[in-house]
Image: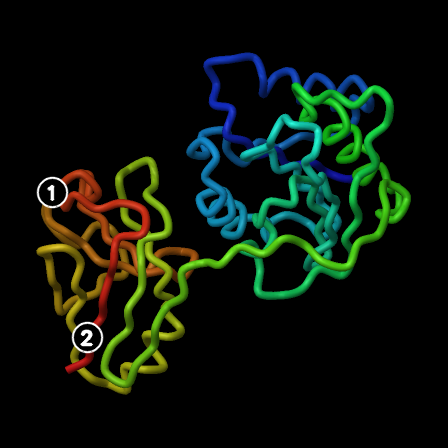
Amino acid sequence: MGLITFMSDFGFKDPYVAAVKARILSINHTIPVVDISHEIEHFNIPHAAYVLKTVFREFPQGTVHLVCVNVPITGDERLVAVKLEEHFFVGVDNGFFSLLSDKNPTAIVEIQKDANYSKVFPEKGVMAKTAVALASGTPIYNVGRQVAELHRMLNRQVRLGKDQIAGHIIHVDNYGNLISNIKEEDFTKLREGRQFLIRISRYSSPYLFDSYNHLEDGEILPVFNSSGHLEIAIRHGNAAQLLGMGYDSPVYIDFI
């Protein structure tokens, strides 16, 4: 028996999360359901991709990830099941999967909509049902019709130069920490022992830290986080509010 993770932009004010989980458990009450997050910013596909990208590999191979973010309710939406890096994903073909991994899926199917398909709440219907089927061992090609490609979405790319790395903020976490798309491996490769200056908004720093505890409360602290991304934090404070920065704000590392 497999495992299902569940991520959405539903929030917790309404019963939508409970309704989807109830549907899963009513089909097969023995399948564990793990919540990733239900506080994804409404309709924000890059935010959802960042959150799941940082954690899905921590789950066992074969895990089914149910992604209910920016799901249209027109009836024309293409719902898909995808096998990627030996994990299964159920969601909408809205560009999300192109942001999730640099690797190509090994299987893509369009989920078939039957006569009972609900345009109002497909997450509770065919999407939950498909997730249960995959977690129960049903082959992916049995849940839909094979398709060749997924819709692609362009993500902000890091620009790597001889003397500068230019990136952007891709996520603001619940503490107000600003997480960028600049990776530690690129920084290490380009630095070559040189001094550096990290620049974001009006703030600059020639330092990197290896934890959040080196500075006094309220001081700004650049660190490569556990996912290997450059993060600008404030000890016991909110960097996003203090610096007036958010999603897509520019970040630079200059090598001196």
Left or right side of 247 for 134: right
For this rendering, which residue is in front, 153 or 224?
153
- Three-letter amino acid code at the position of disc 2: Asp
Residue at 51% from the left image edge and 13% from the top image edge: 14
Regarding residue 1, the answer to whether it shows in the image is no
Regarding residue 192, the answer to whether it shows in the image is yes
For mark 2, what is the residue? 254
Instruction: Name the front one of labels 1 and 2.
Output: 2
Residue at 51% from the left image edge and 48% from the top image edge: 49
> Where residue 83 appears, x then y in whole percent?
74, 53
> Which corner quadrant holds the C terminus?
bottom left
236 above or below 139?
above
> Which corner quadrant holds the N terminus?
top right
Q: Quadrant of residue 128?
A: top right
Q: Quadrant of residue 66?
A: top right
Assign a secondary structure to mark 2.
strand
101 above or below 7?
below
Q: Quadrant of residue 106?
A: bottom right
Assign a secondary structure to mark 1.
loop
> Where residue 193 appears, x then y in whole percent?
24, 85
Q: Which mark is residue 217?
A: 1
Q: Residues within 10 Å of mark 2 (few under 14, many from 20)?
A: some
Residue at 66% from the left image edge and 40% from the top image edge: 91
> Where residue 198 appears, x then y in whole percent?
18, 66
**Residues at marks 1 and 2 touching, judged by CB atoms closer than 8 Å:** no
> Where residue 170 appears, x then y in whole percent?
37, 51
Left or right side of 124 for 235: left
Left or right side of 237 for 93: right
